[in-house]
Image (cartoon, rainbow, N blue to C red):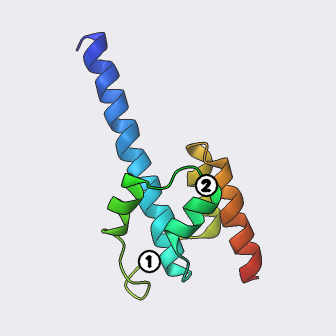
Amino acid sequence: MNSKQLEEKIIQNYQGEEKMMILVFAQWCINHDLNPEELYLRAYPNQFSNIALKEAMELVVPKDEAGEIGDDTLLGVLALFGNDDLAFVVTEEIAKMK
């Protein structure tokens, strides 16, 4: 594998993991009766449309069919990808729930 192929493989892996992070976020929102698109827009007001989030919304399941996603799990996943603004918004929502 040459360096160009390796670089492409690394990018593909990152993009796949990023999609999983977005899916975890979206499902967590659904599980807590929150609108993922509204929360995302609060965190990133200049990004009117997120294609990956829209794709994730097609994969989420109703909360009664979903597994539990812990608050700390979601915050940890967001931190791994440097989504500090989104983590801040999620933290605000967690505080409202308590």
Q: Quadrant of the N terminus?
A: top left
**Disc 2 element:** loop
Q: Nearer the viewer, residue 72 or 60?
A: 60
Q: In which quarter of the image is the C terminus?
A: bottom right
The residue at which mark 2 appears reads as 45
**Distance from label 1 to label 2 (Cα)?**
30 Å
The residue at which mark 1 appears reads as 67
Q: Residue at the location (44% across, 84% down)? A: 63
Q: Residue at the location (56% across, 81% down)? A: 32
Q: Which amino acid does label 2 sit on?
A: Pro
Residue 16 against residue 64 in the figure, above or below: above
Tag shown at residue 10: none
Q: Residue at the location (51% across, 69% down)? A: 36
Judge left or right: residue 46 versus residue 67.
Answer: right
**Disc 1 element:** loop
Q: Which amino acid does label 1 sit on?
A: Gly
Displayed quadrant of residue 88: bottom right
Displayed quadrant of residue 14: top left
x then y, percent, for residue 71: 63, 68
Q: Residue at the location (38% across, 83% down)? A: 62
Judge left or right: residue 89 versus residue 59.
Answer: right
